[in-house]
Image (cartoon, rainbow, N blue to C red):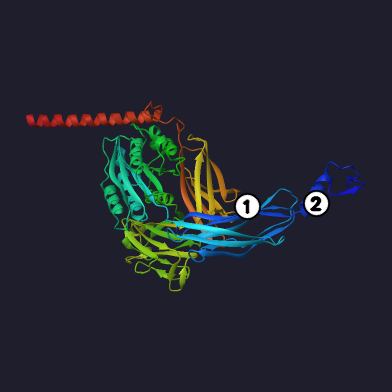
Amino acid sequence: MRDTCDQVGGVVYDSNGHNDNYGFGRINAARSVCEAALLVELTTPSINFNDIPSGETTVRAVVFSVRSCRAVQLQIVSGPTTLTGAANSFGTPIGTSVSLGTTTEITPRTARIWISYTATNNGDTATGTVTIRCTQTAQKWTIPITANTISRPKAAVVMVLDKSGSMDFDGGDGRKRIQILKDAAPVFAEVIQPDNALGIVSFDQDAYDVMPITPAGLETFGAGRINAKAAISAHTPNPSGTTSIGDGVDLAHQQLQPISGYDVKAMIVLTDGQENTPKYIADIMSEINERVFAIGLGTAEQINPVALTALTNGTGGYLLLTGILDTDDYFRLSKYYLQILAGVTNTEIVLDPEGWLYPDQVHRIPLQLNEADINSDIILLTPNPREIRFHLETPNGDIIDPTTVNPSVKYVVGDGVSYYRINLPVAVASGAAHSGTWYAVLSHQDIVIPVSQATTQKQGIRYSLNVHSYSNLRMRTSLSQNSYQPGAEITLRAVLSEYDLPVESRATVRALLERPDNTETTLSFTEVEPGVFETKTMAPVPGIYRLRTLANGRTLRGRAFTREQSLTAAVWKGGDEPLPTSKGDTSECCQRSLQLHKLQLWLLALLVFISVMISLLMLIK
């Protein structure tokens, strides 16, 4: 292999003495020119931060094109300086210089220095400059910076609730499906942020306007919250009702279309069965332009989730399936609603543990908040939140409890939930509390008996702690499968970013997988490109596959962070059959379901007829 060359009398020879006028010599000459030349050009004459939501930090790059094989250094020599607007609006989150090493390549290279902007209040603007110098050439560039702040995006959400006859069936944990819904859905109305709005639609074989889209309003007392909780409480199945999911989705779409003043429009569809009455999802799917989330309350065979998956895919939403619930799954539907709330409002899930609290116990649950987090909701789900003493401990040991008076802290108690809503940093006795390990501390309000004397779980209180954060450090997960038949391949993907930059080589991602046959395993993700993680698994057994995706890592400043999200996949015999439509339902399973509902209606009519005849006979006697 040639590694040296000499030139004698105009002829170039390689290290073996062979003529190389048309080979290595030309490359070597090109390298000489490359090393001799040094051209640095600014390719971003200005930096613009357009429409950054209040409280968020984002970054933009000052970009240079470098033509040279030599080492080059670019560094900030002045700024970034704020000329107008809030002081210190601009920053340098990952350093004030960038260096390129030597190279053998002669193609242009790119160098970037990152500038950040932290948005303040809605309507604010800021301007500034930054001056950057090339050490090797002594060139200087002064780059102008402009920025403006908008309000945090607001969401309008319609809850689409199934009221078909099967909602009165057993849910698997001793509660009827309708009761599971009534226990879980109010949490969404309790926790949704005040600037957002919600409405409710119900459906059986038809769709019904239940509650118009109404601003949520203040925690506890807002009109949207109160009306939504009352509507959910009054939600009652129709004993003879069939299932037209398409009707419900279409009516929710009609509610959302004319609404203005909201940046995100979304719907959450809950159903416990297959669609068997027009309109079908396939009939109206092309008209839907909102984000759609769906929850299937039951098994894959009961729900046939292909149509729901098709409805949610491409909208920014997704489908979650509960499976058959048992007594250990009390909070599953509530947690699904909270996770979807996080998805609708662009909020991250930091932590999601659950447990039992016994009378003489104190549970200190650690949670990681970091400098990228803007605010956080620490949410406690429990059947009676007033039975649990719930306070927070900051990284410095300061205590925040329901009696704390602080403009950055709200404590809210509602039906089946209590939570702290905190803006970060929080001013406390020892200073500003922000990054580090916080603790949610739980204990009984009244100590009755010691845990050693407790004989059943009924003497403890079940709970689930959900920690959400509106943050500049984000994880977006997705799930795809190449079939809905047993043997399908499931692909999971997680994208981690901080200030819109990939979280590169400083995080690990895994998924806890529970299969339909109750076997469990852990899937490790591979970072396939900066900040993008993927893994795959097979689905050999019919049923629902539950996957809890967990990320752990370090921020740009070295602080620990955690993120998580639940996803579900499903396979079943006949899973790849075509979707039913009004133009001809080709799905055998849906035909069987429709026939069953018709039989139920016929039997109900027969029972009514027999009852009337018996009454008449008794009158005649």
Residue 621 in sight? no
Q: Nearer the viewer, mark 1 or mark 2?
A: 1
Residue carrying label 1: 43
Vertical placement of 215 versus 539: above or below? below
Q: Residues within 10 Å of mark 1 (few under 14, many from 20)?
A: few
Residue at the right extreme?
9
Residue at the bottom extreme?
429
Asked where in the image residue 271 lies, by quadrant, the reply is top left
The residue sitting at 35% across, 61% down in the picture is: 454
Residue 475 picture location, percent across and down: 50, 52
Residue 193 picture location, percent across and down: 37, 55
The answer to whether the residues at label 1 and label 2 have Cβ atoms under 8 Å apart is no
The residue sitting at 38% across, 30% down in the picture is: 590
Task: State the mark number for residue 402.
Answer: none
Residue carrying label 2: 32
For numbered disc 2, what is the local secondary structure? helix
First-in-chain label (1 vs 2):
2
User: Is 528 left or right of 609, judged from the image as shown?
Assistant: right
For numbered disc 1, what is the local secondary structure? loop
Q: Residues within 10 Å of mark 2 (few under 14, many from 20)?
A: few
Residue 554 picture location, percent across and down: 56, 59
Q: How many badges with numbers are in the image?
A: 2
